[in-house]
Image (spheres, rainbow, N blue to C red):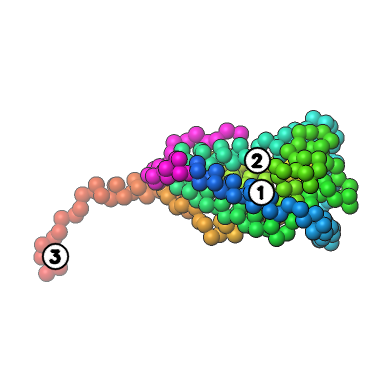
Protein backbone atom coordinates (compact mmCIF):
# COMPACT_ATOMS: atom_id res chain seq x y z
CA UNK A 1 0.00 0.00 0.00
CA UNK A 2 1.53 3.29 -1.09
CA UNK A 3 1.38 6.50 0.79
CA UNK A 4 -0.94 9.10 -0.70
CA UNK A 5 0.95 11.52 -2.91
CA UNK A 6 -1.39 14.45 -3.15
CA UNK A 7 0.20 17.89 -2.71
CA UNK A 8 0.81 19.08 0.82
CA UNK A 9 -2.09 21.05 2.19
CA UNK A 10 -1.67 24.76 2.72
CA UNK A 11 -2.55 24.76 6.40
CA UNK A 12 -0.23 21.92 7.30
CA UNK A 13 2.60 23.14 5.09
CA UNK A 14 2.40 26.56 6.71
CA UNK A 15 3.40 25.09 10.06
CA UNK A 16 7.18 25.18 10.50
CA UNK A 17 8.96 21.88 10.86
CA UNK A 18 10.70 21.35 14.19
CA UNK A 19 14.51 21.06 13.96
CA UNK A 20 15.40 17.67 12.49
CA UNK A 21 18.39 16.96 14.75
CA UNK A 22 16.35 17.76 17.84
CA UNK A 23 13.54 15.47 16.73
CA UNK A 24 15.90 12.59 15.93
CA UNK A 25 17.58 12.90 19.32
CA UNK A 26 14.23 13.23 21.08
CA UNK A 27 12.68 10.17 19.45
CA UNK A 28 15.87 8.13 19.94
CA UNK A 29 16.06 9.23 23.59
CA UNK A 30 12.45 8.28 24.25
CA UNK A 31 13.01 4.89 22.65
CA UNK A 32 16.14 4.31 24.76
CA UNK A 33 14.31 5.21 27.96
CA UNK A 34 11.52 2.83 27.01
CA UNK A 35 13.91 -0.05 26.27
CA UNK A 36 15.79 0.49 29.53
CA UNK A 37 12.55 0.84 31.46
CA UNK A 38 11.22 -2.45 30.11
CA UNK A 39 14.27 -4.20 31.51
CA UNK A 40 13.21 -3.15 35.01
CA UNK A 41 10.24 -5.48 34.72
CA UNK A 42 12.32 -8.55 34.03
CA UNK A 43 12.73 -11.25 36.66
CA UNK A 44 9.11 -11.22 37.86
CA UNK A 45 8.52 -14.71 36.48
CA UNK A 46 6.04 -15.98 39.09
CA UNK A 47 3.97 -12.79 38.97
CA UNK A 48 4.02 -12.75 35.15
CA UNK A 49 2.65 -16.29 34.93
CA UNK A 50 0.06 -15.66 37.64
CA UNK A 51 -1.18 -12.62 35.69
CA UNK A 52 -1.20 -14.70 32.50
CA UNK A 53 -3.56 -17.23 34.09
CA UNK A 54 -5.81 -14.37 35.25
CA UNK A 55 -5.97 -12.83 31.77
CA UNK A 56 -6.60 -16.21 30.13
CA UNK A 57 -9.38 -17.09 32.59
CA UNK A 58 -10.96 -13.64 32.19
CA UNK A 59 -11.05 -13.99 28.41
CA UNK A 60 -12.74 -17.37 28.72
CA UNK A 61 -15.21 -15.93 31.27
CA UNK A 62 -16.09 -13.16 28.82
CA UNK A 63 -16.38 -15.72 25.99
CA UNK A 64 -13.84 -13.96 23.81
CA UNK A 65 -12.87 -15.96 20.71
CA UNK A 66 -9.97 -18.28 21.41
CA UNK A 67 -6.54 -17.23 20.20
CA UNK A 68 -6.15 -20.84 19.04
CA UNK A 69 -8.67 -20.30 16.24
CA UNK A 70 -6.46 -17.65 14.64
CA UNK A 71 -3.33 -19.74 15.07
CA UNK A 72 -5.00 -22.87 13.67
CA UNK A 73 -5.86 -21.00 10.48
CA UNK A 74 -2.30 -19.68 10.30
CA UNK A 75 -0.73 -23.11 10.75
CA UNK A 76 -2.39 -24.56 7.64
CA UNK A 77 0.78 -23.76 5.74
CA UNK A 78 4.41 -23.12 6.65
CA UNK A 79 4.56 -20.15 4.28
CA UNK A 80 1.71 -18.29 6.00
CA UNK A 81 3.08 -18.71 9.51
CA UNK A 82 6.57 -17.76 8.30
CA UNK A 83 5.17 -14.59 6.75
CA UNK A 84 3.35 -13.81 10.01
CA UNK A 85 6.55 -14.23 12.02
CA UNK A 86 8.43 -12.04 9.54
CA UNK A 87 5.71 -9.38 9.72
CA UNK A 88 5.89 -9.40 13.52
CA UNK A 89 9.67 -9.14 13.54
CA UNK A 90 10.28 -6.61 10.77
CA UNK A 91 7.29 -4.29 10.23
CA UNK A 92 6.73 -2.79 13.68
CA UNK A 93 9.57 -0.26 13.94
CA UNK A 94 10.21 0.48 10.22
CA UNK A 95 6.52 1.24 9.64
CA UNK A 96 6.44 3.65 12.59
CA UNK A 97 9.65 5.39 11.48
CA UNK A 98 8.32 5.71 7.91
CA UNK A 99 5.03 7.10 9.26
CA UNK A 100 6.73 9.77 11.38
CA UNK A 101 9.20 10.62 8.61
CA UNK A 102 6.44 11.15 6.05
CA UNK A 103 4.45 13.32 8.44
CA UNK A 104 7.56 15.34 9.28
CA UNK A 105 8.20 16.07 5.60
CA UNK A 106 4.63 16.53 4.39
CA UNK A 107 2.45 17.35 7.44
CA UNK A 108 4.57 19.02 10.15
CA UNK A 109 1.53 19.89 12.26
CA UNK A 110 0.27 16.34 12.20
CA UNK A 111 3.79 15.07 12.89
CA UNK A 112 3.97 16.91 16.22
CA UNK A 113 0.53 15.60 17.17
CA UNK A 114 1.36 11.99 16.21
CA UNK A 115 4.71 12.07 17.98
CA UNK A 116 3.08 13.30 21.19
CA UNK A 117 0.34 10.66 21.00
CA UNK A 118 2.86 7.87 20.41
CA UNK A 119 5.01 9.13 23.29
CA UNK A 120 2.00 9.24 25.63
CA UNK A 121 0.85 5.73 24.69
CA UNK A 122 4.37 4.34 25.01
CA UNK A 123 4.84 5.95 28.43
CA UNK A 124 1.53 4.52 29.64
CA UNK A 125 2.55 1.11 28.27
CA UNK A 126 5.83 1.27 30.17
CA UNK A 127 3.99 1.94 33.43
CA UNK A 128 1.72 -1.03 32.72
CA UNK A 129 4.70 -3.27 31.98
CA UNK A 130 6.26 -2.34 35.30
CA UNK A 131 3.10 -2.78 37.37
CA UNK A 132 1.55 -5.74 35.54
CA UNK A 133 4.20 -8.13 34.17
CA UNK A 134 2.52 -10.64 31.88
CA UNK A 135 3.77 -13.81 30.24
CA UNK A 136 2.58 -14.08 26.61
CA UNK A 137 0.25 -16.93 25.58
CA UNK A 138 3.10 -18.82 23.85
CA UNK A 139 4.58 -19.43 27.31
CA UNK A 140 1.36 -20.50 29.00
CA UNK A 141 0.73 -24.25 28.79
CA UNK A 142 -2.99 -23.79 29.43
CA UNK A 143 -3.43 -22.05 26.06
CA UNK A 144 -2.15 -25.01 24.03
CA UNK A 145 -0.59 -22.53 21.59
CA UNK A 146 2.61 -22.98 19.61
CA UNK A 147 5.53 -20.58 19.86
CA UNK A 148 5.59 -20.03 16.11
CA UNK A 149 8.72 -17.89 16.27
CA UNK A 150 10.81 -20.66 17.81
CA UNK A 151 9.26 -23.47 15.75
CA UNK A 152 9.04 -21.86 12.30
CA UNK A 153 11.12 -18.68 12.58
CA UNK A 154 12.13 -15.97 12.41
CA UNK A 155 11.90 -14.84 16.02
CA UNK A 156 12.95 -11.71 17.87
CA UNK A 157 13.06 -13.39 21.28
CA UNK A 158 15.55 -15.71 22.94
CA UNK A 159 14.53 -19.26 23.71
CA UNK A 160 14.78 -18.60 27.46
CA UNK A 161 13.12 -15.47 28.87
CA UNK A 162 15.44 -15.47 31.87
CA UNK A 163 18.55 -15.15 29.71
CA UNK A 164 17.12 -12.78 27.09
CA UNK A 165 19.08 -9.56 27.59
CA UNK A 166 17.69 -7.79 24.52
CA UNK A 167 13.99 -7.72 25.38
CA UNK A 168 11.58 -8.21 28.27
CA UNK A 169 9.37 -11.13 27.32
CA UNK A 170 7.05 -10.49 30.28
CA UNK A 171 5.77 -7.21 28.83
CA UNK A 172 2.85 -8.55 26.80
CA UNK A 173 0.24 -6.01 27.95
CA UNK A 174 -0.44 -3.70 26.27
CA UNK A 175 0.64 -4.66 22.76
CA UNK A 176 2.56 -1.74 21.30
CA UNK A 177 2.65 -3.64 18.03
CA UNK A 178 -1.09 -3.09 17.81
CA UNK A 179 -1.17 0.32 19.49
CA UNK A 180 1.41 1.83 17.17
CA UNK A 181 -0.15 0.20 14.10
CA UNK A 182 -3.54 1.64 15.01
CA UNK A 183 -2.00 5.09 15.50
CA UNK A 184 -0.36 4.87 12.08
CA UNK A 185 -3.77 4.23 10.52
CA UNK A 186 -5.47 6.98 12.54
CA UNK A 187 -2.68 9.44 11.79
CA UNK A 188 -2.71 8.83 8.04
CA UNK A 189 -6.49 9.00 7.87
CA UNK A 190 -6.41 12.33 9.71
CA UNK A 191 -3.54 13.78 7.68
CA UNK A 192 -4.69 12.83 4.18
CA UNK A 193 -7.85 13.33 2.15
CA UNK A 194 -7.78 10.45 -0.34
CA UNK A 195 -11.02 8.49 -0.47
CA UNK A 196 -8.88 5.35 -0.15
CA UNK A 197 -7.31 6.46 3.13
CA UNK A 198 -9.57 4.19 5.19
CA UNK A 199 -7.67 1.22 3.77
CA UNK A 200 -4.91 2.10 6.23
CA UNK A 201 -7.05 0.31 8.83
CA UNK A 202 -5.89 -2.93 7.22
CA UNK A 203 -2.50 -2.39 8.88
CA UNK A 204 -3.74 -2.67 12.49
CA UNK A 205 -6.13 -5.45 11.44
CA UNK A 206 -3.31 -7.54 9.97
CA UNK A 207 -1.13 -6.69 12.97
CA UNK A 208 -3.86 -7.88 15.34
CA UNK A 209 -4.17 -11.23 13.55
CA UNK A 210 -0.38 -11.61 13.51
CA UNK A 211 0.24 -10.88 17.19
CA UNK A 212 -2.56 -13.25 18.23
CA UNK A 213 -1.83 -15.97 15.69
CA UNK A 214 1.87 -16.08 16.60
CA UNK A 215 0.88 -16.40 20.30
CA UNK A 216 2.81 -13.28 21.26
CA UNK A 217 -0.26 -11.51 22.64
CA UNK A 218 -3.72 -12.07 24.07
CA UNK A 219 -6.80 -10.30 22.76
CA UNK A 220 -6.74 -8.23 25.94
CA UNK A 221 -3.27 -6.90 25.09
CA UNK A 222 -4.73 -5.29 21.96
CA UNK A 223 -7.86 -4.11 23.79
CA UNK A 224 -5.79 -2.32 26.43
CA UNK A 225 -3.53 -0.79 23.77
CA UNK A 226 -6.59 0.51 21.91
CA UNK A 227 -8.01 1.96 25.13
CA UNK A 228 -4.76 3.77 25.95
CA UNK A 229 -4.62 5.17 22.42
CA UNK A 230 -8.25 6.31 22.69
CA UNK A 231 -7.48 8.21 25.89
CA UNK A 232 -4.40 9.82 24.33
CA UNK A 233 -6.38 10.86 21.24
CA UNK A 234 -9.12 12.35 23.44
CA UNK A 235 -6.57 14.51 25.27
CA UNK A 236 -4.25 15.33 22.37
CA UNK A 237 -6.44 16.52 19.52
CA UNK A 238 -5.19 16.58 15.91
CA UNK A 239 -4.48 19.93 14.25
CA UNK A 240 -7.40 21.55 12.45
CA UNK A 241 -6.54 23.25 9.18
CA UNK A 242 -8.19 23.80 5.80
CA UNK A 243 -6.35 20.89 4.21
CA UNK A 244 -6.85 18.28 6.91
CA UNK A 245 -8.86 15.25 5.93
CA UNK A 246 -10.77 15.43 9.16
CA UNK A 247 -12.16 18.89 8.49
CA UNK A 248 -15.87 19.08 9.09
CA UNK A 249 -16.53 21.00 5.89
CA UNK A 250 -16.04 19.04 2.64
CA UNK A 251 -13.57 20.47 0.14
CA UNK A 252 -16.20 20.97 -2.57
CA UNK A 253 -18.40 22.93 -0.20
CA UNK A 254 -15.45 25.13 0.74
CA UNK A 255 -14.71 25.83 -2.92
CA UNK A 256 -18.35 26.69 -3.54
CA UNK A 257 -18.39 29.08 -0.59
CA UNK A 258 -15.20 30.71 -1.85
CA UNK A 259 -16.69 31.20 -5.32
CA UNK A 260 -19.85 32.72 -3.83
CA UNK A 261 -17.76 35.12 -1.76
CA UNK A 262 -15.72 36.17 -4.80
CA UNK A 263 -18.88 36.71 -6.84
CA UNK A 264 -20.43 38.77 -4.07
CA UNK A 265 -17.30 40.88 -3.75
CA UNK A 266 -17.19 41.55 -7.49
CA UNK A 267 -20.90 42.23 -7.99
CA UNK A 268 -21.82 45.92 -8.56
CA UNK A 269 -23.68 47.45 -5.68
CA UNK A 270 -26.96 49.27 -6.24
CA UNK A 271 -26.51 53.07 -6.04
CA UNK A 272 -27.82 54.65 -2.92
CA UNK A 273 -31.04 56.49 -3.60
CA UNK A 274 -30.68 59.96 -2.19
CA UNK A 275 -33.77 61.02 -0.47
CA UNK A 276 -35.44 57.68 -0.94
CA UNK A 277 -38.56 57.30 1.10
CA UNK A 278 -39.04 61.03 1.52
CB within 8 Å, label 2 to label 1: yes
Does 193 lie within the magenta span? no
Q: Main secondary structure of the magenta part?
A: loop
Badge 2 marks a residue whose secondary structure is helix
In the figure, is residue 170 to the left or right of 254? right
In the rendered image, is residue 128 in sight? yes
In the rendered image, is residue 212 in sight? no
**Foreground residue, 275 or 105?**
105
x, y (%) of residue 248?
A: 48, 53
Question: Which image quarter holds the N terminus?
Answer: top right
x, y (%) of residue 211?
A: 74, 44
Residue corresponding to mark 1: 176
Badge 1 marks a residue whose secondary structure is helix
**Foreground residue, 128 or 17?**
128
Q: At 50% across and 41% down in the image, what residue appears?
A: 24
In the figure, is residue 109 to the left or right of 120? left
Q: At 78% across and 44% down in the image, what residue appears?
A: 163
Separation of residues labelled 2 and 3 (CA atoms): 75 Å
Residue corresponding to mark 3: 276
N-terminal of the two: label 2 or label 1? 2
x, y (%) of residue 223?
A: 70, 55
Q: Quadrant of residue 75?
A: top right
Residue corresponding to mark 2: 92
x, y (%) of residue 74?
A: 81, 38
- Boundaries of the magenta span: 1-23
Amino acid sequence: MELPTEPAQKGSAAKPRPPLVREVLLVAGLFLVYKLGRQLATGHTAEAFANAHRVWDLERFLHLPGESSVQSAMLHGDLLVHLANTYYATVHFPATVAFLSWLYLRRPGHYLWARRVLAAVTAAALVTHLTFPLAPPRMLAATGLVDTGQVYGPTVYGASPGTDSLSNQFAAMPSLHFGWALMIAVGLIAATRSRWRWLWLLHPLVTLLVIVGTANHYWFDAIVAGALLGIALAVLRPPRDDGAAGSLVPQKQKQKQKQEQEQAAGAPQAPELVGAGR
